[in-house]
Amino acid sequence: MARQYFVNPFFVLGHLDYIYKNLYLFTMNKHLFSKLFFFAFLAFFILSGSLVNTFAQTNKDLPEWWQDAKFGMFIHWGLFTQTEGYWEGRKAKSVGHIMLYEKIPYKEYGELAHDFNPEKYDPEKWVKDALDAGMKYLVITTKHHPGFAMYHSASSDYDMENLSPYPRDPMKELADACHKYGLKLGFYYSLGRDWQDPDVPTNWPQKGGRSNTWDFPDEDAKVFNKYFERKVKPQITELLTNYGKVDIVWFDTPELISETESKELKELILNLQPECIVNNRIENGQGDYLVLEQRISDKAILEPWESCITMSRYWTYASYDDEWKSPELLVRQLLNIISKGGNYLLNVAPDPLGRFPDEARKRLHLIGKWMDQNQEGIYNTKPWKITGEILETSNSSSSEQESYDSKKPTDQDNDNTSKTIYPEVRFTQKDHHIYAYVASLDDTTAKIISLSLAQAGKIKSISLLGSNKKIVWKQNLENLEIKLPKYPLKETPILGFKIEFEMDNTAMTKQ
């Protein structure tokens, strides 16, 4: 497992006596030792100063709520939901991108809205499910690639108001529920793909590769700025004007947007909602944070970032989708991401009637039960100098992160996250405490090398999160041994420990 170090030279200064004595014993030669110690310490101080400065200079200022939130809900909902993954009596070539892969004319695709009447839609229930799972924000698709607005849009008649029998604005109802219960609200908007508008060219993976070429075949005649002025700016204005406070605009697929247009769009957003943040898919350096889709970084990232990942196989609802990640794997993904400084945006795909699938709700509930006991080391935390460690009883051939090819298509069936379960420990830090989450270890004792005397300094106390149970532990130069109590939740065999040191050993710079 890769380890990411953020070194604090003042921690070393506080432990000089310990370091000096042990290094001398190792060399057993005073003259040689003195030279080694001087040059090693000089090199360390130069290197550590460089690391600290680099971290501070690359950090971007974001609202404190986002950096502390760690966990959010993504919702993919649209006319593709109505198909349930089928087209013309068979499984479709794509689920969420059914219009593209089946080359459905936009007028015919719009006819799906005539039967799209989510009469079981209960946005307050959605919000409560998110909050019960420990999520702090929600992002929902207001307009996905087909170009259909899942709200009442005055600038386009390709929307819920004009084509669907549903009598209300679903985005207005969801916004009201988020505001009522204190869940931060984000609107997803497909920026550089719109298969209803005639002026949206694309160039990935080749020219016209993600364009509507069956309705609008002349790719050279398409002028992105016409679409930008006619649809993007008016709809973003609607979304940031008619729904109260919006905390995030989450753009997707920027494609051929120009630098001037990206800047103009960012300015429009901030003029309408000055506290709103925007992901990096606005493009051209105008985003506030990085998005990784269906993958997790193998090391800590020095800028604000987020991983968006599906709970099952597909982003959008398919009645035959039964490839659900286990609650254990989902919590492990959360810990993997936050140990590296990121946020976890977990996707849920409602059905045509507006209900979360039962399997999704079960997982949200079990994650919430685990969070009730372990949240202290989740929210408002930063990465420690070491992000994680594979425990010694694990299979040495296990890989933390499956290979990811950034050149492969990543817009359909694109889950690149590892599904391997192996014993590991993940670290976070807050308020001069280290939090260690021991995961999936089928043993009575966890031996953690990263928390040895030699690597971490002397530990003062260890407590089990969510419990008053006394913890038996022993620290030496090689490792920290913790006697593990039984896992309280069998579906999520992960224990959180709060660790206090004799001296401040968080050894972190501010994120």
Image: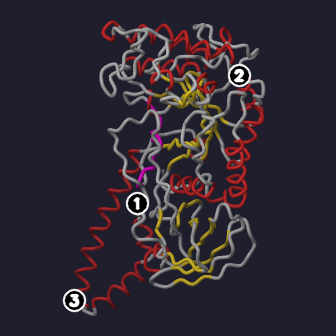
Q: Residues within 10 Å of mark 3 (few under 14, many from 20)?
A: few
Give the residue type that dot 2 points to: Pro
Which residue is disc 1 drawn over?
A: 4
407 displayed left or right of 355: left
Q: Nearer the viewer, residue 147 or 217?
A: 217
Tell me whether circle 2 and circle 3 mark residues in contact (CB < 8 Å).
no
Q: Which residue is painted at 53% across and 21% down in the image?
A: 269
Query: How is this picture coloured?
Result: secondary structure
Q: Give coordinates of residue 91: x percent, y percent.
A: 54, 31
Q: Earlier in the sequence, mark 2 or mark 3?
A: 3
Q: Give coordinates of residue 102: x percent, y percent.
A: 47, 22
Q: Earlier in the sequence, mark 1 or mark 2?
A: 1
Q: Quadrant of residue 142?
A: top right
Which residue is disc 3 drawn over?
A: 31
SS at mark 3 in the image = helix
Vertical arrangement, residue 329 with respect to residue 201, above or below: below
C-alpha span from label 3 to label 1: 34 Å
Vertical arrangement, residue 180 with respect to residue 370, above or below: above
Query: Which range of residues does the magenta coloring cover?
Result: 287-299
Give the residue type that dot 3 points to: His
Q: Give coordinates of residue 456: x percent, y percent.
A: 47, 74
Tell me whether circle 1 and circle 2 mark residues in contact (CB < 8 Å).
no
**Total marks placed:** 3
Query: Does 335 appear in magenta?
Result: no
C-alpha span from label 1 to label 2: 43 Å
Tell me whether circle 3 and circle 1 mark residues in contact (CB < 8 Å).
no
Q: Which residue is painted at 73% across and 13% down in the image?
A: 165
Q: Give coordinates of residue 130: x percent, y percent.
A: 70, 42
| Mark number, residue 170 | 2
